[in-house]
Amino acid sequence: MSDQNVRNAGFTPSGIRGGSLASSMMSQEAKAYGGGVRSGGPTSTLQEMGARGSTHSSGFTSSGISSGSLASQMMSKEATSHGGGTPRGGTTSTVQSISMGGKGGRH
């Protein structure tokens, strides 16, 4: 289900679908970073997972983040760099939100 939710948001094997949540996220992130989407940010991470269909296998599931997964490693790294918590709108929280059928942290 998490892979389908990511595709439904517009992150597809053929790229970001125009007029989708994904295109809105890409636009907002590009504006926030001076015209580009940063590597490792929410948009690029979700697009990579959408293209590969690897959201669930990375540990972002419709019921939460799987222990010992790539997702849990990402969450730990992000929490450490932000003083112990994952920020709303950060990569981990945005990817998890969308994998569960949500709209991410900024929308």
Image (cartoon, rainbow, N blue to C red):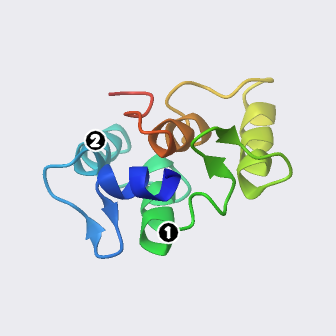
Figure label count: 2
Tell me the tag on residue 53. 1
How many residues crowd around disc 2 within 10 Å: few (fewer than 14), some, or many (20 or more)?
Answer: few
Question: Which residue is rendered at x = 67% and y = 28% of the image?
Answer: 86
Across and down, in percent, residue 85 comes to 73, 24
Residue at disc 1, secondary structure: loop
Viewer-proximal residue among 65 and 74: 65
Residue at disc 2, secondary structure: helix
Q: Earlier in the sequence, mark 2 or mark 1?
A: 2
Tell me the tag on residue 32. none
The amino acid type found where label 1 is placed reads Gly
Across and down, in percent, residue 101 comes to 42, 39
- Is residue 4 shown left or right of residue 14? right
- Whether 50 is drawn above or below 106: the answer is below
Viewer-proximal residue among 25 and 57: 57
How many residues crowd around disc 1 within 10 Å: few (fewer than 14), some, or many (20 or more)?
Answer: many
Across and down, in percent, residue 65 comes to 70, 42
Residue that sits furthest to the left in the current view: 19
Task: Name the front one of labels 2 and 1.
Answer: 1
Question: Which residue is rendered at x = 51% and y = 50% of the image?
Answer: 41
- Whether 45 is drawn above or below 67: the answer is below
Tell me the tag on residue 31. 2
Viewer-proximal residue among 46 and 38: 46
Question: Which residue is rendered at x = 32% and y = 28% of the image?
Answer: 107
The amino acid type found where label 2 is placed reads Lys
Across and down, in percent, residue 100 comes to 50, 39
Question: Which residue is rendered at x = 66% and y = 63% of the image?
Answer: 57
